[in-house]
Amino acid sequence: MSLLEIEKLSLNIGRIPILKDVDLTLDAGEVMGLVGESGSGKSMTAMAVMQLLPSVAKAMGRVRFDGIDILAAPEAAMCKLRGNEIGMVFQEPMTALNPVKTIGEQVAEGIRWHTGATRTDAEDHARKILDRVGLPEKSFPLSRYPHELSGGQRQRVVIAIACALRPKLLIADEPTTALDVVLQAQILDLLRDLVDENRMGLLLISHDLAVVTEMSDRVTVMRHGEVMETGETASTLSAQEHPYTRQLAQASMHVPARARIRGAEQPAHDLLKVEAVTRDYPGRRASLFRKPEPMRAVDDVSFSMKEGQSTALVGRSGCGKSTLARMILALDQPTGGAIHFMGEKLTSRDEAMLKPARRNMQVVFQDPYGSFNPRHKVERLVAEPLHTLEKQPQGAERRELVARALHEVGLKPADMDKYPHEFSGGQRQRLSIARAIITRPKLVVADEPVSALDVSIRAQILDLFADLNQRLGIAYLFITHDLSVARAITDDVMVMHDGRIVERGRTSDVLDNPQSEAARALVSASPDLRRAIAKKLQEQG
Amino acid sequence: MTIIADEPVPEPQPGFLALALRNRSFVVGALLTLFIAGMALLSFFWTPYDVTRLVVADRMLPLSSAHWFGTDQFGRDVLSMIMIGARASIAVALVAVVIGLGVGVPLGCWAAARGGIVDEVLMRFNDVVFAFPALLMAILITAIFGPSATNAVIAIGIFNIPVFARVARAGALAIWPREFILAARAAGKGKARITAEHILPNIANLLLVQGTIQFALGVLAEAGLSYVGLGVQPPMPSWGRMLFDAQPRMMVAPTLALFPGLAIVITVLGLNLLGDGVSDAIDPKLRRQR
Amino acid sequence: MTAYITKRLLIALVTILVASVIVFSMLEIVPGDPARVMLGMNATPEALQALRDQMGLDQPLLVRYFDWIGQLLVFDFGKSYTYNIPVRDLIAERVVVSLPLAIMALALSTLIAIPVGIFSAERRGRMADTLSMGAAQIGVAVPNFWFALLLVYVFAVWLRLVPAGGFPGWGAGAWPALKALILPAIALALPQAAILSRVTRSAMLDVLGEDYIRTARAKGMPRNVVLWHHALRNALIPVLTILGLQFAFLLAGTIIIENVFYLPGLGRLVFQAITQRDLIVVEGVVMLLVAVVVLVNLLVDLSYAVVDPRLRTSR
């Protein structure tokens, strides 16, 4: 008998089917990777095991944990299981902890509830488990509040809560998606060690095939609420017998076809020149009467870009890459230094003087949902940068330009009369690109443009970026934390760390043979599907 | 290979009106509000009796088929007075809301767009206004400048300004960091233009909901002022004044105090339900909770 | 923490200062000569001059303002024209009616509203929730003075349980005095309770949707423990804000309610002073009320820091 047995689990919310006949088994000490794109029902499967479904959800089928029929278990019995026999780690560490309770209280609470231990004993126990997850007493006393901890540290507290009583089963729902790659690698290591130490079963839910491959013994692929394929990790992913598994794997490793690398043969004059740029933010005030120490987000950064060149700016979260991008876009002013674009100085100019530069420099953002004013139609949204032209096209001429831009990104001209909420995430990112190219700019700054998208959509959007680069000669500054994106689409890469650019070179050179410590840390922490499969196969001999 | 991605396109969402009409609060609120507004409009053309004529013989009549709600101490028909009283309540509260919107929203948007010292000064001034008990100040203003409907409007309107300023500012501050605003700035648009094109349409819902709340509070405030004799002046009928006149006659004719009060309750209830309905229909987060 | 407290204290001080300028200038722009306004048309020139001297009306504006502020700081509000006794004594005499009334009303409204709000949130969508929120919706719409009239009719005129109005004074014993305050307190409290219960319910619902509630449930904590130990404290912050605002509301509400019940409190004092144009009394009482509101809001701000640890370390 397995530790967890899910048989023909179906789940409806109202009349909408969320899960259809899901089968899944997990043995003690085994790591099962549950992988799928958004809407595949992987989180709902986890919530069904925890019986933390929304009240409107109706579950049918059978879920047995350690011989207990979970779907039939009364709430009191589930309270005994949760946190004791089954622990759970969630995606969003920033909001997963109660802001008004200390971390000690929050870890000890479950211990006291399940074991009936005294406050002192529970606190001793909490102290031990916090030490174990890498939060030593010296810097992280029990009296710390969540807001005094970083995201990675908070996730460690959540893991401590989940693992405090050595549950038989640990469910981790996208535990590292909100963290940068270096933190991700640390948290995954911690989870792996805890599972080994306590012979826990781990159900690891992730959208990232590489992460799942690195971590799990077996893998289950889900799509639209159904299980597509289940099998032993290495063989499933190397054979790729199921067409959907193959599609996911191919999309994860997708590299757009690019006929020629631009930039190398280009004339020598610079499109963009950043000289000794620094940006300070006012720090947090310790007292009303003392001037706060400024925080340096960008520190003495210099680089230049040629026309048609595609450059990646990579680094951990908080390294200053988005701040730098905003200064290049003249949405923020540097504290020191200068930025030149097409020979014109951008810094300390007023808005009217910036218009010609803005025409030639556009932006694509990460969030396909937040990038558009929900109250305007596509025509108006995509036409917005036309504001930078001397003579602003109106009426038929404007529709003509919008139609052309939509066509270039693979959308229909008829789409211009729709509202943004009528499009899917990938289509919205196409709209975002259409808006960016409508004025035929020389440079597009793209801030994590594919990190909110599912892998197959991500591959399509990367193709589109590559295609536009080839056809229109647009230079890109790609800001990303995902090295596989940088590798797929850029010629050059700059590695940023603590506000400074610590390494720069051809993308393949830097990523294959990183020199600086920061770049080495990034490269070794980045999950890579090809590498992960090879390693798994090798382990099995 | 080419990748076939079959990302589902979102289902078409029902429009605001379709959602609103499915919402019980909205429908009931809209009906009550329309009923009172219709009554006020009708009173311009027709009332059961002429309230300017005092008929001594008909003083203090009980409820009857001729006088549904009875008559007052001057023999005036109470139903007719309530119909005309609706005008004063609606007019005073509505104009006060317009004052609040007209001054408060630009101030709030300005504070949000400029930030820094402008924001700080405006918000501190808001704190100052909030520190005055509004009704007390309204009484003071109307007493100093003379009791009249106009002064009541101004007094209530002044206290609507900081409310709308605060709502507009909070709404605008939530919109400013959004990516579509950055995109508009990258298109070279200035703060005023962005406020007009992007901020206002996105906070209009919030303002609408707050508008119904302030409208309802305005009706209550007008009734209170008229009750203490500082609002609409006799012989123009007003609900608050009718309650004041009814108070000493409670022993003999309690219904005189009943109907004007019910009229106030229905109006305020209708507006509040309408506001709840609108906010349910436009806020998907709240919609999920119900 | 100290930075937060210092900032709040400074804001409170500045608020009171600006408010004093507003009150002072408001009575300064009263149309006509204040002395004439107060004494009426038939006053003799001697009486007018005497009042002008007393109010210092012949001195420059700024001098008068700073004199006034200086007096306020030592609780000297001047002398009432109509009553011919110091305003301070008048206030002392009236505050023993208004303060117990406001406290009773606030306590009553809080004791009703917070349990009802929590209860409704817990039973969201069920019968009990629908009924109590329906009642709250109506409660918000009821003008308190009309509600007062209904209470008088039912409990005083019809059932004869309590007096219809008037105040026997605390000298007549605690019970008769309290009895006279029961109906006014209920009339003030219930509409406020309706608002507060709605705020409590929606604050609880917001908090119950948070991720950390799910974390607590995943720890195995039962629903009611999660509700009382995790949700309530987080929901308190918006509830406290409304409580602070309601205090200002209650103070203003006393003006009308004290008129309905003929209670000799501060509200009635200031209302009569306004109608009798006793500007000195008006100035004094308004400043006092503003100061109380600012003080209460300061206390609310400081209590945030007790509830929310984030305010203690940052800002």
Image (tube, rainbow, N blue to C red):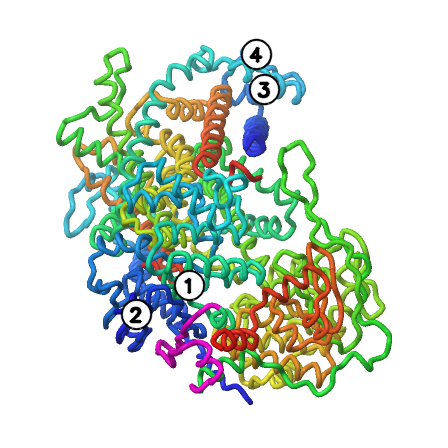
Name the amino acid, label 4: Gln
Q: Quadrant of the N terminus of chain C?
A: top right
Q: Are marks 3 and 2 in contact (CB under 8 Å)?
A: no
| Residue located at (54% from left, 11% from top) | C47
**Chain letter behind tag 4:** C
Estimate the spatial distance between the alpha carbons at disc 3 and disc 1, rounded to whole Å.
63 Å
Reading the image, the residue beneath label 1 is: A173
Please, what is the three-letter code of the amino acid marked with disc 2?
Ile
The structure residue drawn at horizontal position 25% and vertical position 66%, both measured from the top left corner, is: A64
Q: Secondary structure at mark 3?
A: helix
Magenta stretch: residue A216 in it?
A: yes
Q: Is residue C24 left or right of residue A108?
A: right
At x 20% / y 60%, what residue is drawn? A73
Q: Amino acid at mark 3?
A: Ile
Name the residue that disc number 4 marks.
C54
Q: What is the CA distance from the residue labelled 4 to the residue labelled 1?
A: 77 Å
- Which chain is disc 1 placed on? A
Per the image, the residue denoted by label 2 is: A13
Left or right of residue A79: residue A151: right
Q: Which residue is mark 3?
A: C69
How many residues crowd around disc 2 within 10 Å: few (fewer than 14), some, or many (20 or more)?
Answer: some
Position of the C terminus of chain C, as image quadrant, is: top right
Is residue C179 visible in the rendered image? The answer is yes
